[in-house]
Image (cartoon, grey):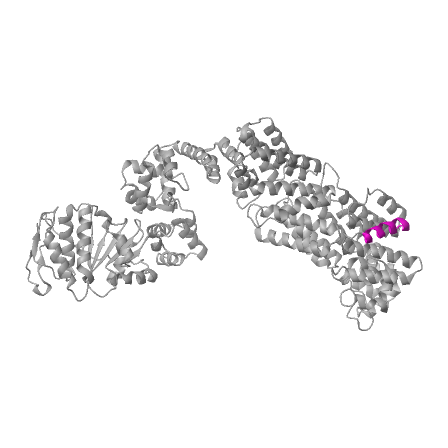
Amino acid sequence: MISVAARDDSARGPALGYADPLGEPFLRTRFAVPARPATFVRRPRLTTHLDQALDTPLTMVNGAAGAGKTLLVADWAARLGRPVAWLTNEAGDQGPGMFWAHVLHALHGAGTPLPAGSAGGPCTVDHRLLARLADELSGRDRPAILVLDEFDRQTAPETAEQLEFVLHHAGPGLRLILVTRTEPLLPLHRYRAAAAITEIRNQELAFTPEEAADLLARHGLRLPAQAARALVERTRGWAAGLRLSALAAQQSADPETYLKEFEAGRGTIADFLLAEVVGRQPPETQDLLLRVSVLDRFGPELAEALTGRPDAGPLLAGLCRQNAFVEDLGHSWYRLHPLFGEILRIHLRARSPGLEPELHRRAAWWLRAHGAVPEALAQGAAAGDWECAAGTLVDDLAIGRLLTGPRADEFTELFSALGPESTGAAVELVRAARALAEYDLDHAVAHLGRAAESPATGAAGAAARLSSALLESLAARLTGSPDGAEQAVAAAARLRHEVPARLLARHPELTALLHTHLGSARVWAGHFDTAQAALAEVAELPGDALTELPREDCLGHLALIDYLDGRLDRAASRALAATDATRSRGGRPFPGAGLGQLVLAAVAVDRDELERARALLDEAAESGPGTGAPDPVTEACRALAGGRLRLALGDPAAAAHAADPAVTAREPSPWARANTALAAAAVLLAEGRTGAAAEVLDGIDGLPGPLCAAEAAWARLAAGRREEALETADRLCADARTGPGVTVRATLVRARAAAEAGDPGTARKLLARALLEARPDRLRRPFLDAGPGIRRLLDTPPLHGLAAGWLHGDGSGCPSLLVEELSGREREVLGRLAQMMSTQEIAADLYVSVNTVKTHLKSIYRKLGVGRRADAVRRARERGLL
């Protein structure tokens, strides 16, 4: 019976007896507001939200075990400044009668007047008493505040109905606050629709990094902001997890390292979760939790595949409703709290040794069958089932994901444990892709050969052959085999019709990579027009994470073609687009990495920006793969830019060495070979060996590329092959497709030939044309390398206006050609020239060899645009250098 008897305290209304309906005494601890520990962190964002409980009839604080629900409400209640009726529910309470006996005792203890009367036994309650209670509450001037902690222990629907009756009819006289792990059996939808409920849920209860840092500090632990964020990420802000971690870290010699690396499965956190969460579940639910712990996410069907239970769906939904550390991802997919998952996996290994790999294997095959490629790969790798993992990748046409895309490193790492015992075509293709990603060509070719020895049939066979064609195109590119790339891409084009269109649509990187490698191989072969067709198709693709790397690669190659055609501005624009994307992307280098910087370096040399060119060459070296077989086109461009820079710095021998690309290719590149020959010819011309230079130039087949042809024309003119030089120059000037980088050089050939033929008027007209063409691109280097005769013509008044402001000075006084600044040592040599010292005297005075002095003199003459000592001293005085 629930008896309501009179007590001495008549001012507080009728009193309750000191015993519940079973005759047991009311335990005071169940009605006391819990005390907060000294390390409690008050969180204003939550208490401010909880203040709304005074304005709504119902408040629900709903969160997982250890989320900090009770302490939050207790702190708020203690600071409220008015009585709060508090009841902590227990699992042993039996029936509505027992529940209402405790509720009435809590309300009475908070000073709420109660009606006289009685109710039935411990399992029943008189409806008339509930009606009188609601009526008594509704007449209050100030509402009674009732907190029911651990309300999830009340599972009887009848109790919930009775509570809803009292809450509804009490009106503004009652503010009910439920602290619970699950949603109560109240008509919450009605309260939500009427905006009559205040809710604080699990996600809001999670600690922020700042709050976590405060909690740790109260435990005497000072953690950097980044470490606090990492701890919050691992615990998902779970209050109990943070507190238990802090308590354990206090016992560690290195608390920061402990909090970063602690084993969740061993210690108080594991004890808490296993007791409070797992231990409260029936055996079948415990088994489900253990088995799904091997998964990052799971749905009912996948859980059924691992457990064999047809009721996995309802069990998962129930766990989620209970806040049992099972998080709802939407669309019937779930995941475990990270710490909970760690603990369950350790518990699984102890309880069922050997079961974990089998669960990974089942999950891998289920995920593969349902097209979940990344998850299937991860599960297959975890199970050591490389046939499943590799087959998943190949059958899905996802082999390119090992080479490009934001997850390339992750996918490659998944296969790091792939051992030699695994066999099969798919496994060999994965091995080949990993070898190519590391530029290990010998092993890659061997794996491709073994993959071809194990042909598959049907759609899977077509996918394997198409994957093989992609890898063969990359191998052909890296080995300098244009024919091999053409054959691989042609085979891929035939195979595209044998695989499902949906797969091709899902993998744009496959086509992008094929065209990129084909385009690069064509550039190596000097087939620039057909290379542009393949490269442009990829470069024009919209931004996509899977095609980003091929697009950057293609932009670099297109920039190189533009440069070799003499179109400097367009080359620089495309190269900048490639380098900007590369810098922002980071990650693993791709075959054409650094090509954009190399093109920009070559453009900088042509503009006489030599320090910028040097910096770009250094940057390109850092962008490349570093080890393994280099990309032929990239290395050829590195040789071109490096050779030009050293030639501009006045060191022909170093230029010839740098211009020889460090690459071994199956087929030579005509333009790369021509560039090497031109550098060698420059050395011979600098030594005055014009005949030998002409023989080197005769070895260039067909003068591949307009830029090579223009420079060969200049070299032939310097070697005394005037007619051949002019024939080439005339043809290049008449070609509308070539840019200023070519036509300016060709025009300078014609101007020099006219000047040497005693026709200065024609030479000046040609120089004027060259200046007009060169100015928009700031193309300075050809004029600086044109020799004293051309530079003397440029210093004449008719041409000075065309050169002022970009090639000359500001146009006032005596015009002078803008060239690279003299180095410190060159200034020392120049100073001694002005003192009329001989070469031998300068060498002795500076403690260097005579040859070193001669090298400095050549550089000084070139930079000042003169050919003799006296002219060098005069020009230096004009420029204020002496």
Residue 176 coordinates in the image, percent (x, y): 22, 57
Q: Please check the rendered image and state whether residue 720 is part of the magenta-colored stretch, yes or no.
A: yes
> Does residue 248 show up?
yes
Residue 824 coordinates in the image, percent (x, y): 76, 62
> Residue 335 sits in which quadrant?
top left
Left or right of 795 on screen, residue 163: left
Q: Quadrant of the C terminus?
A: bottom right
Range of the magenta residues?
719-734
> Residue 80 sits in which quadrant?
bottom left
Residue 688 vertical position relative to residue 364 in the rendered view, above or below? below
Number of disc labels: 0
Q: Please check the rendered image and state whether residue 288 is part of the magenta-colored stretch, yes or no.
A: no
Left or right of 371 on screen, residue 564: right
Left or right of 650 on screen, residue 570: left
Q: Nearer the viewer, residue 687 or 60?
A: 60
Taking the spot 84% from the left edge, 45% from the top edge, the residue there is 697
> Residue 436 sits in which quadrant?
top right
Q: Nearer the viewer, residue 56 or 254?
A: 56
> Does residue 837 show up?
no
Taking the spot 31% from the left edge, 40% from the top edge, the residue there is 314
Residue 368 vertical position relative to residue 405 in the rendered view, above or below? above
Residue 418 coordinates in the image, percent (x, y): 52, 33
Taking the spot 66% from the left edge, 46% from the top edge, the residue there is 535
Taking the spot 22% from the left edge, 47% from the top edge, the residue there is 153
Q: Residue furthest right?
A: 758
Residue 659 coordinates in the image, percent (x, y): 76, 47
Q: Mainly helix, strand or loop, the magenta region? A: helix
Left or right of 653 on screen, residue 278: left
